[in-house]
Amino acid sequence: MIEVQIAHGQGSALLEAIARVAVEQLGEDPKREPGELIMGLPLNMDGTEGPRAKIVRSFGDRLALRTGREIHMQDERLTSADADWQMAGTGMTHKQKKEKRDSLAAAAILSDFLESRGVRPEETTDGDRPSPGWG
């Protein structure tokens, strides 16, 4: 997990932190070591883009230039609410739910992205889905 204040240095610290992780996970050379990045796009409930979506797109453009990687934007509407619904009735404390919410929402964003491209996860041998974001 990357924990950097978004506003610090107009996003430069976050940009560098993500770039470091991209190199660690994908390699330094995007031409020899392929890999793409997916970002959640905060759309309005009616599907339009507001000011926050424009900021995220701008950051995505900066990240693409910095890493040399293709950046995909994926609608993130209701992913946090979905995470909350998944955790309802689990017995977790409010603090535990808060700590896990972003991870579950990120998993849902990735799942939605893959499903939009026709990629479906394989089921495990016991029939369970590999992660809570798969629908």
Image (spheres, grey):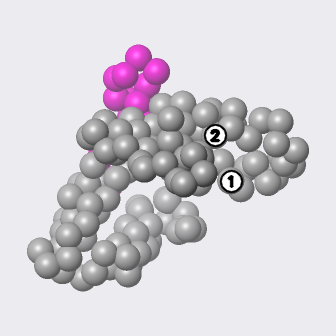
Indicate which disc, 1 or 2, sits on the residue closer to the N terminus.
2
> Which residue, given by chain and number where applicable, does mark 1 sit on?
100
Please identify the residue farthest to the front as the structure is shown.
125
Which residue is located at x 41 percent, y 61 percent? 10
Q: Is residue 44 left or right of residue 72?
A: right
Residue 110 visible = no
Pick whichever, 103 or 131, lies toward us: 131
Which residue is located at x 24 percent, y 82 percent? 28
Using a 10 Å C-alpha cutoff, classify the residue at mark 1 as few (fewer than 14 neighbours), some (14 to 19) or many (20 or more).
some
Q: Is residue 60 above or below residue 5?
A: above
> Which residue, given by chain and number where applicable, does mark 2 sit on?
83
Where is residue 97? Give x, y as percent.
76, 48
Query: The N terminus is located in which quarter?
Result: bottom right
45 falls in the magenta region: yes
119 falls in the magenta region: no
Which residue is located at x 61 percent, y 34 percent? 82
Q: Dot 2 lies on which element?
A: helix
Query: What amino acid is found at the position of numbered circle 2 in the picture?
Result: Ala
The CA span between labels 1 and 2 is 8 Å
Please identify the residue farthest to the top as the structure is shown.
46
Q: Is residue 14 left or right of residue 32?
A: right
